[in-house]
């Protein structure tokens, strides 16, 4: 019997089989006059999903609980600061909300177009007059107690036969809570339940801090969604988008370093970028000013690849290359002199996967025998020119 139960007819729903919180909202908000939201946090992705359903609603109130709970406040990414916040201070509440919002916008994984549309509709609602008085949308933060509730309260029009509804459970105001995550929510329709939820919400609302203007101010002045982006800021955005993959890869790069070796960011970045170029074109130039560690960058690059390496360098640098690569944990390599290219070829080169050529500028003349020998050695290999 349970297998034949129509999930749309039951009180509980879990975002499965198309019976999501978003689908419930779409079905109920079209007849809703007043809509109240009490959540630990809300995300712009949630508003993008919901704004069309909120168009006919006359009044929307969103109350965000400023909680130190880690799960409820993972949007902040500033957990270590939370214990220092004075939650009784309205000024600090507003400031913290602004920082939370800015962080969310700048680090959001949402599609930029969806994010921007959702935010702009949110601001539009914040500025639109409501037949109920005030603005169509108002948002406040509750500063003095930990709130980790997820409650959605709807009041139908007085002419409707039903009074309203309360939805509560595990879903926060986000796309994940509305659709993507496996959640557990319940919808209550009894008038006494709705009135009780309304009364509790109204008490909290009266004690909360109005942050509607702070929302607008933060979006329009402190994020990329503002309408006054300078050419320099646009340039920075372009550079970030172009290098975003490399920037994120650096967080995953954890090289082995010799004892006492200083980890320098520019060397790690160079090694990451060099690997990307090497994989794409089967060759890469490592060029820099004398003394900035091209040998070390090469070692960091070789840590990221699999296979045997041949290093070709001036005779006086053979020991230096051996010691450097060994210190960086490289084991599958051989070092040979630039003057022994013919001997290298006679011994066989099939066992090498990577060729490192130090002082590669010595081979700039293609009309020499040494150039031809080096070309034979490098053919079919991945080549690193230093």
Image (cartoon, rainbow, N blue to C red):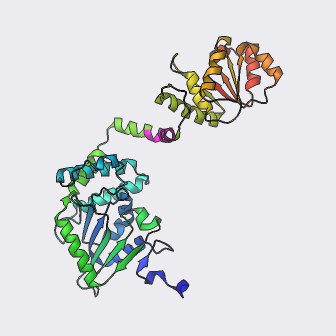
Q: Which residue is drawn at 30% across and 60% down?
A: 122
> Which residue is painted at 76% across and 14% down in the image?
340
Q: Is the magenta stretch mostly helix, strand or loop?
A: helix
Residue at 83%, 20% (x, y): give it. 346
> Which is more toward the observer, 159 or 291?
291
Q: Which of 161 and 143 is in front in this view?
A: 143
Q: Note whether residue 258 is visible.
A: yes
- Determine if residue 364 is in view: no
Q: What percent of the width, then of the height, locates residue 128?
A: 22, 63
Part of the protein shown in magenta? 240-251
Q: Which residue is nearer to you in this view: 260 or 336?
A: 260
Vertical arrangement, residue 178 with respect to residue 267, above or below: below
Horizontal side of residue 249 vs 337, given as left or right? left
- Give above or below for 6 relative to 114: below
Q: Is residue 265 above or below residue 118?
A: above
Residue located 26% across and 84% down the image: 191
Q: How many marks?
A: 0
Task: State the image quarter where residue 322 is shown.
Answer: top right
| Horizontal and vertical percent position of residue 342 | 79, 16
Point out the residue furthest to the top here. Answer: 316
Where residue 86 sits in the image (x, y, percent)?
Answer: 21, 51
Name the quadrant containing residue 235: top left
Query: Quick one: 144 or 203, which is closer to the camera?
Result: 144
Q: Does the magenta stretch include residue 242?
A: yes
Q: Does the magenta stretch include residue 321?
A: no
Image quadrant in which the C terminus is located:
top right
Residue farthest front in this picture? 259
**Relative image position of residue 230 (x, y in whole percent):** 32, 38
């Amino acid at each position: 019997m349970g297998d034949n139960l129509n999930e749309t007819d039951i009180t509980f729903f879990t975002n499965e089989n198309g019976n999501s919180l978003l689908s419930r909202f779409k079905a109920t908000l079209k007849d809703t006059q007043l809509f109240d939201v009490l959540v630990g946090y809300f995300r712009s992705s949630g508003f993008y999903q919901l704004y069309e359903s909120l168009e006919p609603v006359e009044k929307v109130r969103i109350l965000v609980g400023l909680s130190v709970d880690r799960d409820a406040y993972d949007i902040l990414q500033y957990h270590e600061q939370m214990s220092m916040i004075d939650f009784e201070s309205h000024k600090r509440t507003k400031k913290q909300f602004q920082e939370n919002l800015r962080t969310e916008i700048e680090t959001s994984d949402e599609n930029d177009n969806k994010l921007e549309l959702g935010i702009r509709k949110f601001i539009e609602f914040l500025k639109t007059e409501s037949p109920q008085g005030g603005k169509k949308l108002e948002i406040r933060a509750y500063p003095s107690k930990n709130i980790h509730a997820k409650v959605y309260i709807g009041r139908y029009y007085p002419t409707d036969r039903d009074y309203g509804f309360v939805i509560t459970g595990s879903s926060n105001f986000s796309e994940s809570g509305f659709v993507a995550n496996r959640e557990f929510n319940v919808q209550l329709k009894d008038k006494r339940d709705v009135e009780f939820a309304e009364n509790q919400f109204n008490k909290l609302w009266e004690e909360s801090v109005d942050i509607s203007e702070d929302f607008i101010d933060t979006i329009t002045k402190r994020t990329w969604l503002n309408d006054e982006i300078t050419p320099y800021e646009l340039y920075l955005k372009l550079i970030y988008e172009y290098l975003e993959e490399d920037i994120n890869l650096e967080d995953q790069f954890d090289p082995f370093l010799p004892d006492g070796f200083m980890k320098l960011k520019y060397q790690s970045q160079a090694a990451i970028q060099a690997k990307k170029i090497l994989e794409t074109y089967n060759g890469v130039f490592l060029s820099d000013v004398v003394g900035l560690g091209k040998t070390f960058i090469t070692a960091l690059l070789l840590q990221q690849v699999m296979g045997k390496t041949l290093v070709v360098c001036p005779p006086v640098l053979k020991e230096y290359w051996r010691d450097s690569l060994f210190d960086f944990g490289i084991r599958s390599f051989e070092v040979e002199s630039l003057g022994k290219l013919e001997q290298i070829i006679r011994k066989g080169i099939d066992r090498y996967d990577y060729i490192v050529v130090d002082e590669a500028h010595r081979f700039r003349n293609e009309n020499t025998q040494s150039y031809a020998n080096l070309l034979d050695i490098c053919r079919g290999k991945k080549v690193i020119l230093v």
